[in-house]
Image (spheres, rainbow, N blue to C red):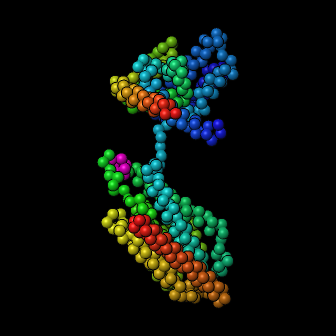
Amino acid sequence: MAANDLLDRYLFAVRRYLPAYHQDDLVAELSANLRSQMDDKQEQLGRPLTEDEQVDVVRRHGHPILVAARYQPQHSLIGPEVFPFYWFTIKRVLPWVVGIWLLVTAVTIIFGSQGVSIAERINVGQIITGFFGAIFQFLAWMTAGFALLEFFKGHLRHEFTRPNWDPRKLPKADPVAEHNGPHHPYADAIAGAVFLAWLLAFPHFPVLMFGPYATLHVLKIGLDLPTIWHQFYWLVVVFNCIQLVARIALLFRPVRRYYRAIETVLHLLGIGIVASLLRTHDYIGQATFGGSPMSPQAVATVNSSIHNGLLLVLIVAIAKFLWDTAQWLRLRAASQAAART
Amino acid sequence: MTEAIQSVFENLRLELRRGCLILAVLAQLREEHYGYTLRKTLADHGIDIEESTLYPLLRRLETQGLLLSEWREHEKRNKRFYRLSPAGAATLEQLLVEWESINSSIHQVLSTNAQEA
């Protein structure tokens, strides 16, 4: 193969990956450099280069994709300053999204199309696709939101890099204090606001919950749910409003002295909401079925399963509350003992 | 040396070299060069730098205003010649002072360690 042909191939391949507005200029420069290198080598050897030697020169220069990539400006959708907030918010909100998706999917399957048995309403393929669709949508919206934050984060960088920041304002290195204040107050507030917006939006825009499968009849939220579920939904909304107000208040340092009390109240409210669902043993309600072929025995089984599931959730929530409180008391006692010595 | 330590060493070596390479390129471009001759001259001075690193670096330094460039015919071929801009010359002087200071501090640390040993 002639040297010109080899170089042309190589430069053509590099050009495809270069930034469009600099392609001609960069390729001309690379071409001049490579040709000079070949001429130089030829002069040293005192003979024309063999094909293998030409290939060697080009190969050493690097693969076209890698060579072109070095000329690309460095881009990152979410940079290292914002990424910890992004990651923390996802970790915080994702379990809630999954939990609510599961709950709503279960409810819509139970109360879905009338005159169709539950077994017929369960379409595993649609459920799996709907689940991943919901997760994908959640991640996409979060990524888009934080990418915007990254774009407008000038003030954030200024906050972190201003030369007169005061190390005395950093929180005290105290394990008890760790339990006495939010770890990531801004991410908590952002996560709370995003989640509340999603919670309020999804009944009107089922696509936020089910993705493209929202249009399928089997997954449409029925309007004939028993009252308890309506009450539950609004209790969750009110709870999240209270939680968001608390999270915003905790952005202000003086409020953080009440962090433990605020967290305790929020925990107890959460436990109360789950407990409120245990008031009844009727989660299906005959009125929603009309001419449903479901037998009374099947209704009783579903009601019992939901009740037991909620009971388990309540027990876990209470156990977690007790564990957190015990941890805090233990650390506080240790800290007081250390202060006395 | 285990593979893991070797890999750590390679990363540290690259970090150490990165800043030094910029210094070497700026220093060498007090005289005018085009990409290939610059690489060759640096190699003659013991500083090997890959083409895929050097050529984009030249573009970046030019964008930052530290280098000036122009296309010119040389040995019957059009080539892009680079040289230090006035801002580049001032920056190079500052970097050299910084480099001398680091170099001398490291020598002091090493000689103190040697005396204590």
Q: Is residue A298 above or below residue B59?
A: below
Tell me which residue sits at (55%, 70%) in the image.
A99
Q: Quadrant of residue A16?
A: top right
Total numbered labels: 0
Q: Looking at the image, which is closer to me, B112 or B20? A: B112
Q: Residue at x 47, y 38 (%)?
A: A73
Find the magenta span and give its range: A156-162
Q: Residue B23 placed where, x, y %?
A: 44, 27
The chief SS type of the magenta part is helix
Q: Position of residue A139 (x, y in %)?
A: 52, 59
Q: Is residue B17 magenta?
A: no
- The quarter holding residue B29 reads top left
The reply, left or right, for residue A340 in relation to residue A217 is left
Give the residue at x 58% y 35%.
B10
Residue B18, compared with residue A291, is above or below; it is: above
Residue A94 coordinates in the image, percent (x, y): 52, 64
Q: Is residue A239 visible from the viewing direction of this image? A: no
* Residue A136 in sight: yes
Residue A51 occupies quadrant:
top right
